[in-house]
Image: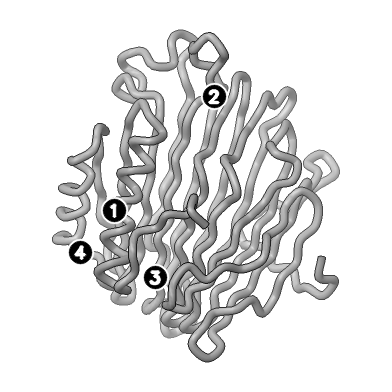
Amino acid sequence: MNSSRSVVVPPWAPPASAERPVRGRLELGIEARGDRSIASRQFHEGALKVVRPHYLDDSGQVCYVVVNPGGAYLGADLFLIDVEVGDSASLLLTTQSATKVYRTPGSFAEQRMNVRLGEGARLELMPDQLIAYREASYRQRTCVTLAPSSSLVMAEVVTPGWSPDGTAFRYEEVRLRSEMWVQAAEGDRQLLALDNLLIRPPSGDVTGMGFMDGRSHVGSLVVVDARVDQALADELNACAAEHDARTGISLTRAVAGTTGLVLRSLSNSTGNLNSLLGACTGLLRKRWYGQEPLDLRKH
């Protein structure tokens, strides 16, 4: 653990209190140095840390893997993550394994993540799936502030935990809130998009018709980049149509020359959604950066 750090509190985050203990804190700063991106600031405490950096190709993009040694999120747990990617730097951030949320009696488990991207900075946020088990309640708040020239690709899969006999556990709710802000030239932040996802299974069969169109799994992809337009949205929609999932895509308005899109898919399989999101992100990696699709399991 690095003892020198500066704590940045996102403007929307309520202060941590004794009633909501901070179980894990992670801070990571990335800067461009020569032809590579490296960590300029790193701090962790509690049940969060990162392992040594990897370079998956010759692009100079650095890959960090977030690890939760505790293995799961429990009731009233609070996890804080702060990430800054400096000008022209590139970061791929993923997790070692799925994020598991077990029973949360008394209060929900929560993760708050604050991200800042400099001019020409790039972040791919590609965690493994979030698994909510029986009687679990989870909230996740992600606030991203971008420069007009920076690029964000952020994926997420939510899946219910399963019992040994194959029946679905019934988690109480999952709330995912993502804010994307653009730092304007005059110094003011402008809201580009606010994405709210609330999943609250009914008391009956979690896969019954009427709830998520009979599907049990949700996949999301958020892309913010000046190169996002309707043609790209149509191409990603066509890419998603090749997979066994029901998908919709929404474009944001343009702010300071940058635009975003949100893709949402429903399926009954984590594998289907991972394949769909992998195909979409692979298209972006190849076209924009000449990189191959991600295969994180081989590293």
| Residue type of the residue flagged with mark 3 | Ser
Mark 1 near mark 2, Cβ–Cβ under 8 Å? no
The location of residue 37, given as percent across then percent down, is 54, 79
The spot of residue 92 in percent (x, y) is 50, 64
> Does label 2 or label 3 sit earlier along the sequence?
3
Q: Which mark is residue 151?
A: 3
- Camera-side residue of 280 and 214: 280
Q: Is residue 4 above or below residue 81?
A: below
* Above/below status of 89 relative to 10: below
Q: Secondary structure at mark 2?
A: loop
| Upstream in sequence: badge 3 or badge 4 | 3
| Quadrant of the frame with the N terminus | bottom right
Q: Residue at x 36, y 20 (%)?
A: 211
Mark with earlier residue (4, 1): 4
Q: Amino acid at mark 2?
A: Gly
Q: State the residue position of label 2.
A: 161
Residue at image mark 4: 229
Q: Is residue 118 above or below residue 54?
A: below
Whole-angstrom CA distance, mark 2 to mark 3, is 33 Å
Residue 280 is tagged as 1
How many numbered marks does the figure carry? 4
Whole-number angstrom distance, CA of label 1 to CA of label 2: 26 Å
Position of residue 20 relative to residue 135, above or below, is below
Q: Could you tell me which residue is drawn at 66 percent across and 27 percent down? A: 102
